[in-house]
Image (cartoon, rainbow, N blue to C red):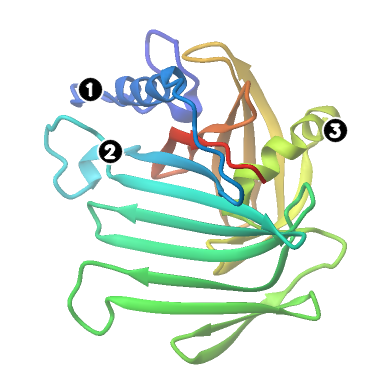
């Protein structure tokens, strides 16, 4: 934590003479999001959308890590809409420094844990110009327990899941944590789930628990995500039920824009 003690350690990445400062960029992004009071269009069928600014936790480790006007290294767009009783997710992750571009599509049942169902697809691209610059991964559940992937035509069995523990994707946690916040706080020990990280890696026995409440830089409630083989991450929920900050080991997502939708 910084000497001024103002920001929680889970997203405090101000270091030395780094310009622009991490805290300045984080507060500015959230502040602009919260002060933008222009009414959003909520046409029938419009998806609920959250757009996040990607900030690097360790700026010197990124290409082009010299001084510039903005610290952002990309954008994450999380869209979801409910159709015929299922939540349809479309997640776009673009890292402008690494050239990585991911498009993830999956469906979840309409429950607090957002259990993953039937099939999903990941399209990955990078800035290279060879045959390895693109990858397509499709996956599906067999009898709701065995997870299988098809990567560029090759079939892979990832593993099996315990039917008694909910299986969800880390990109659905933007809805899972707000839905379970009260349950998590009341439990004292958090809730257990099986996480399917980036629709590629099974992380059984993962746990979401309550971390802390803060008032600076904004009024937020923090939750942690821990699990075997999983790098810890910290999720901060605002008063309106939006994930405002999601901080992983290498980068932090900061809410830039929200569109309510009508789902």
If the image is split into quadrants, where does the N terminus sit?
top left
Label 1 crowding class (10 Å Cα cut-off): few <14, some 14-19, many 20+?
Answer: few
**Helix, strand, or loop for circle 3?**
helix
Q: Say whether disc 2 or disc 1 marks the residue closer to the N-terminus.
A: 1
Tell me the number on the disc at residue 245.
none
Label 3 crowding class (10 Å Cα cut-off): few <14, some 14-19, many 20+?
Answer: few
Task: Please say if 27 is above or below 249.
Answer: above
How many marks overall? 3
Tell me the number on the disc at residue 72.
2
User: In the depicted view, which residue is nearer to us: 69 or 46?
Assistant: 46
Residue 48's spot in the image, x, y percent? 57, 44
Residue 93's spot in the image, x, y percent? 40, 55
Q: Which residue is mark 3?
A: 187
Residue 207's spot in the image, x, y percent? 71, 46
Marks 2 and 1, how far apart at CA: 18 Å
**Helix, strand, or loop for circle 2?**
loop
Are discs 2 and 1 less than 8 Å apart at CB?
Answer: no
Name the image quarter holding residue 181: top right
Q: Say whether disc 3 or disc 2 marks the residue closer to the N-terminus.
A: 2
- The residue shown at (52%, 59%) is 90
**Helix, strand, or loop for circle 1?**
loop
Task: Please say if 86 is above or below 38.
Answer: below
- The residue shown at (25%, 60%) is 99
Q: Which residue is mark 1?
A: 16
Label 2 crowding class (10 Å Cα cut-off): few <14, some 14-19, many 20+?
Answer: many
| Left or right of 28, for residue 220 | right
User: In the depicted view, which residue is nearer to us: 208 or 29?
Assistant: 29
């Amino acid at each position: 934590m910084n000497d001024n003690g103002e920001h929680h350690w889970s997203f405090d990445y101000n270091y030395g003479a780094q310009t622009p400062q991490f805290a300045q960029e984080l507060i500015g992004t959230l502040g602009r999001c919260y002060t933008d009071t222009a009414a959003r269009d909520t046409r029938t069928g419009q998806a609920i959308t959250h757009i996040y600014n990607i900030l690097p936790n360790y700026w010197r480790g990124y290409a082009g890590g010299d001084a510039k006007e903005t610290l952002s290294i990309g954008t994450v767009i999380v869209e979801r809409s409910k159709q015929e009783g299922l939540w349809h997710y479309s997640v776009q992750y673009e890292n402008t420094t690494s050239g990585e571009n991911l498009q993830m599509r999956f469906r979840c049942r309409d429950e607090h844990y957002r259990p993953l169902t039937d099939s999903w697809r990941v399209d990955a691209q990078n800035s290279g110009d060879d045959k390895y610059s693109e990858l397509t991964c499709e996956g599906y559940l067999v009898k709701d327990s065995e997870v299988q992937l098809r990567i560029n035509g090759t079939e892979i069995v990832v593993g099996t899941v315990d039917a008694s523990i909910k299986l969800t994707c880390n990109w659905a946690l933007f809805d899972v944590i707000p839905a379970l916040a009260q349950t998590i706080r009341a439990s004292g020990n958090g809730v257990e789930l099986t996480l399917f990280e980036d629709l590629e890696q099974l992380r059984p026995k993962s746990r979401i628990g309550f971390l802390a409440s803060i008032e600076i830089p904004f009024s937020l409630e923090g939750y942690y995500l821990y699990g075997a083989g999983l790098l810890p991450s910290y999720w901060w929920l605002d008063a309106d039920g939006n994930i405002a900050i999601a901080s992983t080991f290498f980068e932090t997502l900061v809410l830039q824009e929200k569109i309510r939708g009508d789902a």
